[in-house]
């Protein structure tokens, strides 16, 4: 009795210490089976370098499996407004927060917060993924919006998409862009300190894997076209070459960037600071770019909106991340990497200028 009361108090405070899975739930509907990507020798070598830099915690050189895509219809579940996590019979649904390794980092497990209960009748879905997608465009597009494709293309009945009003403006904008053309869908806004008990919930699987921007081509194209159309992207015959600078960032800065600037100028490469642009301007810029250079960072998420381009990404030797290599793989873009020195405690590092110049020569003037 005391144990039940204890867990009841924790649940009232928005904290759940146990989890459950719905992978074998009777309401699950498989939409597309998993499959494995093929890599050539050069790609495998890059993936091996990445795996080594992370002590083989993730090793895609052994094979990258695009996960199964599915929907699960659930009855009488709670959605937590502070995290987007689902709770079924007092336990957090693993598939609503991505994977088991993220559970301990989710507000559903680590944050005690009074959440006001509200009942909601009808059919709902949500792709909230907090705190990761909070003002982070990588997680927003790959872990949130991409999942809506599964719902909107396969659920014809009326359905309400649960969203937070306090998300970044570009997130609210792009959410409405993807909903256009789907009259069955509308938006309902939940507060950070609310938890909704919903009559029926449709849970979409996550599409992207950890450290991966890979999306199946039909989902990537759907998302690209929705955002292009929503922001009114205009074709431009004069293609651009850009370098995304992190000079104003706190982490992952290129310490010898000043050495690169004269070289970039000789090859007609513009230096861009994404934080100085509106999101519409960022989308337009990447759409126009035929070559993109940048240190690893969320700014490269906008490669999703390039029409066609070549990519050079910088990495510190001890943190070689695969997110945008796999995005380029999905989009058919030519991807290259330059590996710099070992990063310091803020992941700052220097890059070999001669390798950058060799890549610029290779792509031509």
Image: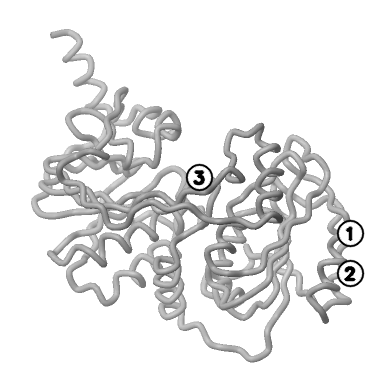
Give the mark nearer the N terminus: 2 vs 3.
3
What residue appears at the point 34 percent right and 27 percent down from the top-left corner? Answer: 112
Position of residue 312 in the picture relative to residue 274 (left or right): right
What residue appears at the point 29 percent right and 75 percent down from the top-left corner? Answer: 180
Position of residue 247 in the picture relative to residue 95 (left or right): right
Q: CA distance from mark 2 to mark 3?
A: 34 Å
Q: How is the image coloured?
A: one colour
Which residue position holds label 2? 263
Residue situated furthest top in the rendering: 2
Position of residue 319 in the picture relative to residue 267 (left or right): left
Say few, some or many: other residues with alpha carbon within 10 Å of mark 1 (under 14 / 14 to 19 / 20 or more). Answer: some
Q: Nearer the viewer, residue 13 or 183?
A: 183
What residue appears at the point 17 percent right and 8 percent down from the top-left corner? Answer: 2
Q: Residue 258 location in percent, x, y?
A: 88, 60
| Label 1 element class | helix
Say few, some or many: other residues with alpha carbon within 10 Å of mark 2 (under 14 / 14 to 19 / 20 or more). Answer: some
User: Where is residue 289, by image quadrant?
Assistant: bottom right
Which residue position holds label 3? 210
Give the mark nearer the N terminus: 1 vs 2.
2
Q: Is residue 164 visible?
A: no
| Label 2 element class | helix
Residue situated furthest bottom in the rendering: 237
Callout 1–callout 2 Cβ contact below 8 Å: yes
Q: Which mark is residue 353?
A: 1
Q: Residue 264 location in percent, x, y?
A: 84, 71
On-image quarter of the N terminus: top left
| Label 3 element class | loop
User: Where is residue 189, by image quadrant?
Assistant: bottom left
């Amino acid at each position: 009795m005391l144990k039940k009361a204890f867990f009841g108090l924790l649940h009232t405070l928005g904290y759940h210490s146990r989890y459950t899975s719905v992978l074998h739930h009777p309401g699950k509907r498989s939409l597309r089976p998993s499959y494995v990507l093929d890599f050539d020798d050069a790609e495998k070598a890059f993936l091996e370098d990445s795996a080594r830099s992370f002590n083989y915690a993730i090793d895609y050189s052994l094979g990258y499996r695009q996960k199964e895509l599915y929907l699960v219809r659930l009855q009488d579940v709670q959605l937590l407004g502070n995290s987007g996590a689902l709770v079924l019979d007092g336990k957090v649904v693993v598939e609503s927060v991505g994977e088991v390794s993220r559970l301990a980092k989710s507000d559903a497990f680590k944050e005690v917060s009074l959440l006001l209960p509200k009942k909601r009748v009808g059919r709902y879905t949500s792709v909230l993924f907090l705190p990761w997608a909070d003002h982070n465009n990588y997680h927003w597009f790959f872990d949130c919006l991409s999942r809506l494709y599964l719902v909107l293309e396969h659920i014809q009945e009326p359905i309400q998409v649960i969203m937070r009003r306090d998300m970044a403006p570009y997130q609210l904008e792009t959410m409405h862009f993807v909903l256009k053309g789907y009259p069955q869908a509308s938006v309902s806004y939940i507060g950070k300190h609310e938890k909704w008990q919903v009559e029926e919930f449709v849970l979409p699987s996550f599409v992207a894997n950890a450290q991966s921007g890979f999306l199946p081509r039909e989902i990537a194209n759907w998302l690209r076209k929705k955002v292009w159309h929503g922001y009114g992207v205009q074709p431009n015959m004069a293609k651009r070459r850009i370098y995304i600078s992190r000079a104003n960032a706190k982490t992952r800065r290129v310490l010898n960037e000043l050495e690169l600037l004269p070289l970039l100028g000789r090859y007609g490469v513009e230096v861009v600071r994404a934080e100085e642009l509106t999101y519409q301007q960022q989308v337009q810029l990447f759409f126009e770019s035929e070559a993109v250079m940048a240190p690893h960072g969320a700014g490269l998420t906008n490669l999703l909106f390039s029409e066609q381009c070549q990519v050079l990404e910088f990495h510190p030797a001890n943190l070689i991340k695969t997110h945008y290599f796999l995005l380029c793989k999905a989009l058919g873009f030519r991807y290259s990497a330059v590996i710099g020195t070992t990063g310091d405690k803020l992941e700052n590092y220097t890059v070999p200028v001669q390798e950058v110049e060799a890549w610029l020569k290779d792509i031509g003037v």
